[in-house]
Image (cartoon, rainbow, N blue to C red):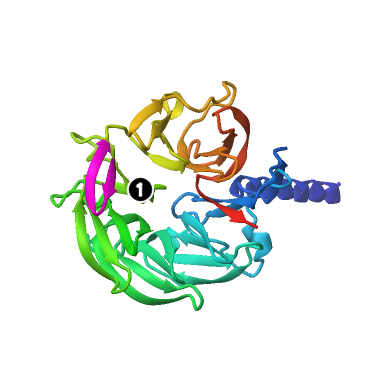
Amino acid sequence: MKHLKYIIYLLFVAFVASSCRENDIIIYPTENNVGDKLVSNYLGLYVLNEGNMGSNKATLDYLDLSTGVYSRNIYPSRNPNLIKELGDVGNDVQIYGNSLWMVINMSHKVEVADAKTAVSRGHVDIPNCRYLAFDGGFAYVSTYVGLPNSESVLGAVYKVDTASLKVVDKCIVGYQPDELVVNKGKLYVANSGGYNGMKAIGYDNRVSVIDLKTFKVTNTIKVAPNLFRVRNDKYGRLWVSSRGDMKRIPSKLFIVENDVVVDSLDSRTDGFDFRGDSLISYSGRGAKTKFKVIDIRTMKMVNDDFLKFPTDVPIKTAYGIIIHPATGDVYVMDATNYVSSGKIYCFDKDGNYKWHTLTGDIPGHACFLMK
């Protein structure tokens, strides 16, 4: 009888321990066949999930476009010797040459892997890094430099040799720079001043212009407070989003040409991507989320309710958007409640729902892998 009680006790302890492990581990390496097979010059789609700050839960997912299989959290199995896997807060992902570059914000590094296998090549140490741009064999990484509770300092752009993964230069820009883009031999950096919004200094409102030959700031373009995204359109113009000051000044979109603000649109914009002559953006949350289509030739909105979400799985928190360059399919990332698995939705070029599947925590960044 004593032995039976002991065995029952051990089984109970094992059950409790197993339950604790299941509660602690939210993301498992899993696969889901979404059934959407596409034939084009693009092999797959990488999705970088931010994970909750402080939890070291940034993860990488992969959609095989030829088989329609979506795989979650692939990095640990591809890199079993990396103890902390990706790290804390995935903030940007892009492919340059044969390498996959991932900004891991609060781990203060840029992780670099083989683009096809996702096997690590190494990493670059950069404090509070944010976003990526590439040109001429170099990676350009925006960084806040300082931390939220520290004294506000000017941000910077680090120049990294993509072959050696060594930092070769640094350029000081505005406060808390976010997205950046290369255009006609210059690097344009959207400064947010996000840490300063509640301080007397206020949000930054400038785009810093860096000459790539000298790697020096040659101009600053005054736009609007709390800048965030900056992208090139097919005509060589820049589209810059402002989140406003959260009080009197609303979020808007601005068009910059030849280093001058030439137009603006009174449209709140949390994120956007281009498809030909169309800009597709999103803003809002839950049932109030709006997906808009803007004709970039006329600067007019042609549709303010583009994507048709299924009523049984509505979007909760739109957090990222990317458009397939060949098919025009629209992929929308949903952070849901920010603490558990997110979702990715796929729509065809006309905005009709195709499928959705679970992702890691807080999906927000993606890039396509070409053949």
User: At which x and y percent is residue 207?
Assistant: 25, 54
Whether residue 155 appears in this view of the structure is no
User: At which x and y percent is residue 165?
Assistant: 48, 75
Q: Is residue 5 above or below residue 121?
A: above
User: At which x and y percent is residue 51?
Assistant: 50, 50
In the image, taking residue 216 as reference, residue 294 lies left or right, namely right
In the figure, residue 284 lies in which quadrant?
A: top left
In the image, taking residue 204 as reference, residue 94 lies left or right, namely right
Tell me if residue 102 is in the magenta stretch: no
Identify the amino acid type marked 1: Arg
Determine whether the residue tagged by mark 1 lies in a helix, strand or loop.
Answer: strand
Q: Which residue is labeled 1 in the image?
A: 229
Q: Is residue 302 above or below residue 37?
A: above
What's drawn in magenta, residue-wise?
Answer: 254-264
Tell me if residue 256 is in the magenta stretch: yes
- Residue at 43% x, 38% y: name it: 277
Prevalent SS, magenta region: strand
The furthest residue to the left: 200
In the figure, residue 314 lies in which quadrant?
A: top right
Q: Nearer the viewer, residue 86 or 13?
A: 86
- Residue at 53% x, 25% y: name it: 308
- Of the 4 image quadrants, the one containing the C terminus is bottom right
- Residue at 56% x, 33% y: name it: 349
The furthest residue to the top: 311
In the image, taking residue 5 as reference, residue 293 lies left or right, namely left
In the image, taking residue 352 as reference, residue 237 lies left or right, namely left
Q: Is residue 185 above or below residue 302?
A: below
Whether residue 284 appears in this view of the structure is yes
Sort mark 1 into few (<14), some (14-19) or many (20+) by Cα contacts within 10 Å: many
